[in-house]
Amino acid sequence: MKTLHSILKSLPSTKVINPDVDFSNYIPLDLSVNNPELFERNFENAQDFEIFISDFLNKNDGKVAYGGYIETRNIYKRSIIFKNDTIPERNIHIGIDLWINAGTSVLAALDGKLHSFKNNEGTGDYGPTIILEHEIENEKFYTLYGHLSLESIKNLNVGTFYKKGEKIATIGNSEVNGDYAPHLHFQIIKNIENYWGDYPGVCSKNDLNFYIENCPDPNLLLKII
């Protein structure tokens, strides 16, 4: 029996945002604690963050900034959902981020049905979120699409089937997406447990091995490079 990792590798590449943007226009972005360009940056508000992303894309002649899988970041320190008196600090990103303008189309990564959706409100959270359920070669797994527009989760019905490449949503702005520069958080989940319209997208160092196993690298499927 194939593993999810091997199944994802064997599938053709797919896009989860605007299909008209070629992968050659995707530029890798390092938001880790090791990037010296971020040492003097203060991303306390989404406007500063958005300017940084825009400047980065202009400088590199790109249309989409991407990256972040298993990346340790400082940008989560501003939110209590990632660190408080009752939980260890969560600062390792376990999906892939695709930074592009609000309103950009979001596409189903694969054929699948709507598992759940929810507006995860609060600074640092996903905002509007959609989760699709897939089954390939008897392997059931899920894809999560976070930081969407509010319109994206209106009039949805659990169980609705979507074809690969079908538009399912649009990217939200900072007013609804958890106060980030506009982007899509895309994540693959093997066992979603009892989560509904939500699943951790950032983990602690102590839990990293579990999440690497349960949330394989989305680029196995996207194949951006």
Image (cartoon, rainbow, N blue to C red):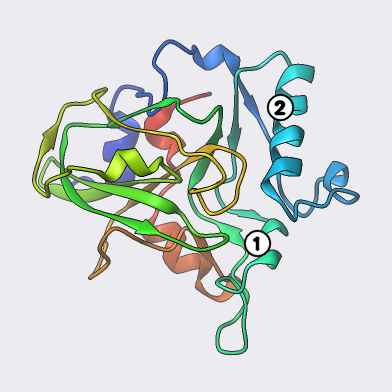
Hey, which residue is sitting farthest bottom in the picture? 86
Report crowding for label 2: few under 14, some 14 to 19, many 20 or more residues within 10 A (C-alpha): some
Front: mark 1 or 2: 2
| Figure quadrant of residue 100 | top right
| Residue 76 marker | 1
What residue is at 53 percent from the left and 39 percent from the top? 173
Percent across and percent down for residue 2 are: 21, 45
Closer-to-camera residue (179/215): 179
Query: Number of labelled discs?
Result: 2
User: Earlier along the polypeptide chain: callout 1 or callout 2?
Assistant: 2
180 vs 140, nearest the viewer: 180
From the viewer's perspective, is residue 125 above or below residue 7? below
User: Few, some or many C-alpha atoms within 10 Å of disc 1 (few <14, some 14-19, many ≥20)?
Assistant: many
Left or right? Give the position of 30 relative to 128. Answer: right
Mark 2: secondary structure = helix
Local SS, label 1: helix
Q: Can residue 3 be seen in this snapshot? A: no
Residue 54 disc label: 2
- Measuring from the top left, give residue 168's x and y in whole percent: 27, 32
Front residue (pair 174, 219): 174
Visible in this render: residue 16?
A: yes
Point out residue 219 in the picture as x, y percentages from the top left corner: 45, 35
Residue 195: image x %, image y %? 27, 66
Relative side of 224 to 130, left or right: right
Q: What's under tag 1, amino acid-wise? A: Tyr
Name the residue located 60 percent from the left edge and 47 percent from the top edge.
180
Which of the 4 image quadrants contains residue 150?
top left
Q: Residue visible at 23% across and 70% down?
A: 194
- Is 174 on the left-hand or right-hand side of 3? right
